Image: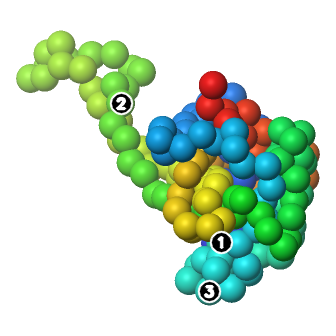
Amino acid sequence: MKKCSIHYVVLAIILLSCSSQIVVRTDYDREINLRQYKSYNWLPTKDIESKNQPLYYNELTDKRIKKAVDLQLVGKSILKDSLTPSLRVHYHIIVDNRASIRPANYGYAYGPYWMRNQMDSYSYREGTLIIDLMDAKTNNLVWRGWASSVLNDNDIDLSETKITEAVFKILQQFPPQ
């Protein structure tokens, strides 16, 4: 069971980074000028959900996500500062079971159900990667970006390139115009 859960986390991140059906959204505090932030650091490891959801987090994934975020923020002239950062960075990984109903592809039924459209139901997994940016002084959330995608059970390769692409799509929206 532990191995299966880790695979779902891996699949979530992979699909977030390589699927053409990735949905990216952001939200932020509109009363704060997000361009004022020039430095960041990661929240301490003790504040990460790995204690609550250890199957969803591992050292390899953590290292890859942090490296990808570091590259994107430095590219936006926001430098890493372990002593006096103006932002704190954190991420979350969520994998949910979903169900959907859709029209069947085989057309209409005949007989007592004349001309009634047939419906199919199916279950799937949805993975979401969330990146939070918090004001380091107040510890208040100032910006959140997330990407969600349907997971493909056949794709289990978690590469640094794919994580970098997912993080790029999320942080492309920061700071808002």
The reply, left or right, for residue 102 in relation to residue 138 is: left
Marks 2, 1: nearer the viewer = 1
- Judged from the image, the secondary structure of the residue bearing numbered disc 1 is loop
Return the x and y of residue 124 as percentages of the image width and height: 50, 49
Mark toward the start of the polypeptide (3 vs 1)? 3
Return the x and y of residue 39 as percentages of the image width and height: 80, 55
Q: What's the residue type where badge 3 is placed?
A: Lys
Q: Dividing the picture into quarters, in which one does residue 90 lie? A: bottom right
Tag on residue 102? Answer: 2
Mark toward the start of the polypeptide (2 vs 1)? 1
Q: What's the residue type where badge 2 is placed?
A: Arg
Task: Specify the farthest residue to the left.
Answer: 112
For disc 3, the marked residue is 51
Marks 2, 3: nearer the viewer = 3
Return the x and y of residue 165 as percentages of the image width and height: 81, 40
Residue drawn where x is 53% and y is 58% of the image: 141
Q: Dividing the picture into quarters, in which one does residue 48 lie? A: bottom right
Return the x and y of residue 135 as percentages of the image width and height: 61, 60
Q: Is residue 118 above or below residue 38?
A: above
Residue drawn where x is 34% and y is 25% of the image: 103
For disc 1, the marked residue is 56
Task: Specify the farthest residue to the top.
Answer: 115
